[in-house]
C-alpha cells in the first residue's frame, strides 16, 4: 500500500492557529513525512497533532481565564490601595490639624494662667481663695498626658 500524504503545514497552521515558527519546530522533532516501514505514522501524527492542538487551546483558554481573574484581582487591589492612600492622607491632615489646635489651646491656657497669676494679688482674700480652689479643681481635671508629666 502507498503511504498517505503528509498533512499540509498550512492546513495544520489554520487548524491549530499557531505560528509558522512553532510548526517548523514541530517538523524538526516530529517530521510529517512517514518513516520507512511505517505507513500509519502520518495518520497517527495527524491525530496526535490535532489532540495536541486541542490540549494547547484548552490550556491557553485556562491561562487566559486565570490571567483575566488575576487582572481583575490586581485592579481591585490597586483600587483598594488608592482608597487606603486617600484615607491615610485624610487622617494625616486631620491629625496635623488637631495637633496644631492642641498647641494653640495649650498656648491660650499658658497665657490665661499668666494673667490669673498677675491678677491674683489684687483680689480680696475671699476672691483669692475661690480662685485658688478653682485653679486646683481645673488642675485635677486635666489629663497629665497633655502637659508631658
Image (cartoon, rainbow, N blue to C red):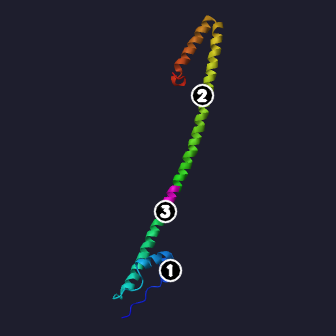
Q: Position of residue 61 (x, y in %)?
A: 46, 69
Residue at which label 2 appears: 102
Q: Nearer the viewer, mark 1 or mark 2?
A: 1
Residue at which label 1 appears: 14
- Mark 1 packing: few (<14 Cα in 10 Å), some, or many (20+)? few
Q: Is residue 17 above or below residue 132?
A: below
Q: Position of residue 18 (x, y in %)?
A: 49, 75
Q: Which residues are magenta?
A: 68-74
Residue at which label 3 appears: 67
Please tell me in which quadrant of the rendered image residue 48 appears. Answer: bottom left
Q: Nearer the viewer, mark 2 or mark 3?
A: 3
Main SS, magenta residues: helix
- In magenta segment, residue 69: yes
Identify the secondary structure beneath mark 2.
helix
- Mark 3 packing: few (<14 Cα in 10 Å), some, or many (20+)? few
Q: Is residue 114 above or below residue 50?
A: above
- First in sequence, mark 2 or 3: give its number: 3
- In magenta segment, residue 92: no
- First in sequence, mark 3 or 1: give its number: 1
Could you tell me which quadrant the N terminus lies in? bottom left
Amino acid at each position: 500500500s502507498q503511504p498517505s500524504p503528509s498533512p499540509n503545514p498550512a492546513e495544520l497552521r489554520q487548524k491549530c492557529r499557531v505560528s509558522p515558527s512553532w510548526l517548523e519546530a514541530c517538523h524538526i522533532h516530529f517530521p510529517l513525512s512517514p518513516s520507512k516501514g511505517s505507513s500509519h505514522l502520518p495518520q497517527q501524527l495527524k491525530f496526535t497533532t490535532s489532540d495536541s492542538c486541542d490540549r494547547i487551546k484548552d490550556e491557553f483558554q485556562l491561562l487566559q481565564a486565570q490571567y483575566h481573574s488575576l487582572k481583575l484581582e490586581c485592579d481591585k487591589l490597586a483600587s483598594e490601595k488608592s482608597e487606603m492612600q486617600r484615607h491615610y492622607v485624610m487622617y494625616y491632615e486631620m491629625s496635623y490639624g488637631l495637633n496644631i489646635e492642641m498647641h494653640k489651646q495649650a498656648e491660650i491656657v499658658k497665657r490665661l494662667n499668666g494673667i490669673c497669676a498677675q491678677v491674683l494679688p489684687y483680689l480680696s482674700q475671699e476672691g483669692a481663695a475661690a480662685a485658688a480652689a478653682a485653679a486646683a479643681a481645673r488642675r485635677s481635671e486635666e489629663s497629665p498626658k497633655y502637659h508631658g508629666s
